[in-house]
Image (cartoon, rainbow, N blue to C red):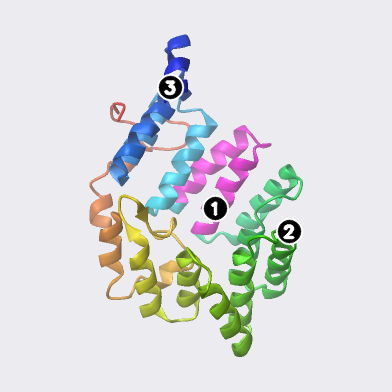
Amino acid sequence: RDSIEQALEVDPANAQAKAYLASLSYAAMTSWPGEARAVAYAMSLEPGDPVFNADASTFLRGLGRPAKAVRYAEYAAIRDPLSARFQRTLMLSHFSAGNFDEALEANRRMREITGGFGGLWYRGMTQLLAGDSTAALAAFDEWAAGNGDDNRYAIHGRTLVHLVRGEQAEFEQGFEQLQGIEDNEWLVAMVYTLAGQADEAIRTIDKMIDPPRNFGPPDMNASPIFSRLSDHPRWEELLRKRGTHPEQIAEIPVDDYFPGPGLPPTVPVEAP
């Protein structure tokens, strides 16, 4: 905060400093309406800034608006095509929207920019959901080769490959290993979901949701995986606990705050 305030002393019109200060205020509020206001405030200051548009994409994805998230991510990536961060944001928004070909292309561009660093787990997951378990396994193996200290994502990915291939013994062995790793509920919940064990998936997600410290899976409202739980009797209960039930979202003026990429809010937005 001190650094940001010093930047504002030097340049009171510094839009990024104002936006970051608003984000700090949001962090103290830890609520979806608070985040919406902070992100919208940034867009009101400098609607053409690709960083602010990427932030809007991330927020919209978390709120369950993947199609609109894609538009904001595309805007940011077009304006700075050499930004690995913006390609990652675009990849995640396409993944949440179920646009697997586009997600893989954004993943390729991101890894090209970074010299092959990052994105392997998401590449593998995207390929797996697109039906290519061979390519997915190769991505997870590559992850394992480069991340010897923490292989939970490789274990998770390989476990799912065994699942979709019907290799039951290998699946059970991998899943047991995955469950033995601490702070791993998100990955465990994915396995339960894709294995058709909806009750266990719901119970695992429920343990993860503890506002304002933890809101559960980051893409819970827009996920090609967790969307398979939407018919479960407890699904709406978890959305309410997380603060992203449709009735709760309806209280946030999302379309007024985010009318389109590169555009300011259509309503006044004060700093949080």
User: Callout 1: 10 Å neighbours few (<14), some, many (20+)?
Assistant: many
**Callout 2 secondary element:** helix
User: Where residue 172 appears, x then y in whole percent?
Assistant: 56, 85
Residue 95 magenta-highlighted: yes
**Callout 1 secondary element:** helix
Q: Between label 2 and label 1, give the one nearer the viewer.
A: 2
Tell me which segment is drawn in magenta.
Answer: 67-96
Which disc is residue 2 wearing?
3
**Callout 3 secondary element:** helix
Q: Which residue is mark 1?
A: 92
Q: Earlier in the sequence, mark 3 or mark 2?
A: 3
Which disc is residue 146 wearing?
2
Instruction: Work out which quarter of the rendered image holds the C terminus and state it.
Output: top left
Q: Does 148 sit above or below residue 49? A: below
User: Hey, what amino acid is under mark 1?
Assistant: Leu
Magenta stretch, overall SS:
helix
